[in-house]
Amino acid sequence: MSGSIFTAKFYLLQSTLFQDSVAGPKVFTFLKKTTFLSVKTPKMVENILNKSNDRNPDVHDMLIYNEHGDLGAFVLIEEHFEKIMKYVAKKNWDAVYVLLDGFIIYIHRPCPAPTDTSAIEREHGLLRLHGACLMTMFRELDKQGRLNTQNFPGLEYFLRYTIQWIEHAKDRLVGIFHLGSDILPHLNVCKAIAYRLFKNQTVEDLNLHLTRIREWVQWLEPRVTEDDHDYAGTKVWVQDCLIREWPWLLLGVKPWYLEGRDHHVSKKGLELNLEEEWSTFSDYRKENPLVPPKGLSWEFKDWSEEEREAHRGETVYEPSDEEEGDDDDSSDTESMGWGMERSFWKM
């Protein structure tokens, strides 16, 4: 995976823009062109990616056609929610935010998305759990008056890729599994939140975003190597990106968050009860555990050479008969500005 944005190499933005910040860590990074994260999150992403690679047949020359890699990595997603729920119990919403922010790893390859399982109940249950986590966190942060970019500088990025991923998951559930169009009611709530938070952005807000990008690029350029071809020629790259992929920042084109203008914080979305969703999903996991094939470890690095040879070329899981559709790396193609903050949560 040389040259991937997930090469376990993350470029941090040591920015003077945050030296006067009173909330949160003072170091942030662009993990990707449109993902602006706390420094804690990339480290988490790196750990998850490494674990996922340990379960990937291709990485370990296990040329077997099966779902071992996807299902093994899906277990990581379920374990991710176990960590989230521990912090929910402590009402540590900053930690919950960081863990949900780390969910970005499941939007990109080579890590699987939470939709990479043929078990529709498992997939739908996890998506509802994700929605309930989001709704609970947003509600509690808003009660504290902290749901804003002053406390969470990457909030607009967070909402943008969260909405994009929920839309992708909804299209899959409705289009492939023919579930109802209202199966993920928190989608429109997230859109409404984004609109209300960022609709009154100023020129200064947008300029701050561009300043952050350019500062990161200036810091990054002398540190890239020949292997980092995704970041080669960064000055040319960033100018090209600003012109091609973020035209609304420069040309006044309709920004993404205006999609939430016609939505509201719906009662149905708010009715996602986190305790109930977690209980339901936990019961399902107990009744339908994901276990490694033939009693061996999910991680190929733990297999002996004899075990590898015995199973190389063998089908561990039968592939699903259902058409899974094309993969989508769900890359962002628009950037975020920085907006005005306001309390808006209406119960």
Image (cartoon, helix red, strand yellow):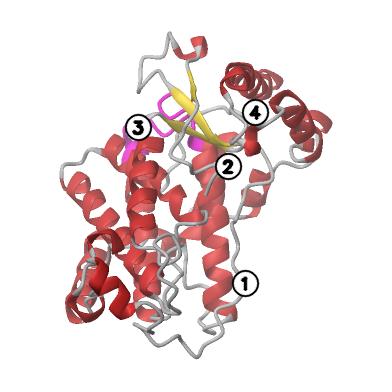
| Residue 199 in sight in this render | no
Q: Residue at x 63, y 16 (%)?
A: 218
Q: Residue at x 59, y 35 (%)?
A: 228
Of badges 2 and 3, the one in the foreground is 2
| Residue 260 in sight in this render | yes
Q: Which of the two labelled residues, at mark 2 and mark 1, occupies the earlier sequence position? A: 2
Q: Amino acid at mark 3?
A: Lys
User: How many angstroms separate mark 2 from mark 4 (CA)?
Assistant: 35 Å
Q: Amino acid at mark 2?
A: Gly
In the rendered view, tell whether residue 170 sits above or below residue 175: above
| Contact flag, marks 3 and 1 (Cβ < 8 Å) | no
Tell me the quarter of the picture where residue 239 sits.
top right
Residue that mark 1 sits on? 326
Residue 63 at x, y percent in the picture? 45, 73
- Please check the rendered image and state whether residue 224 is part of the magenta-colored stretch, yes or no: no
Residue that mark 4 sits on? 201
Element class at badge 4: loop
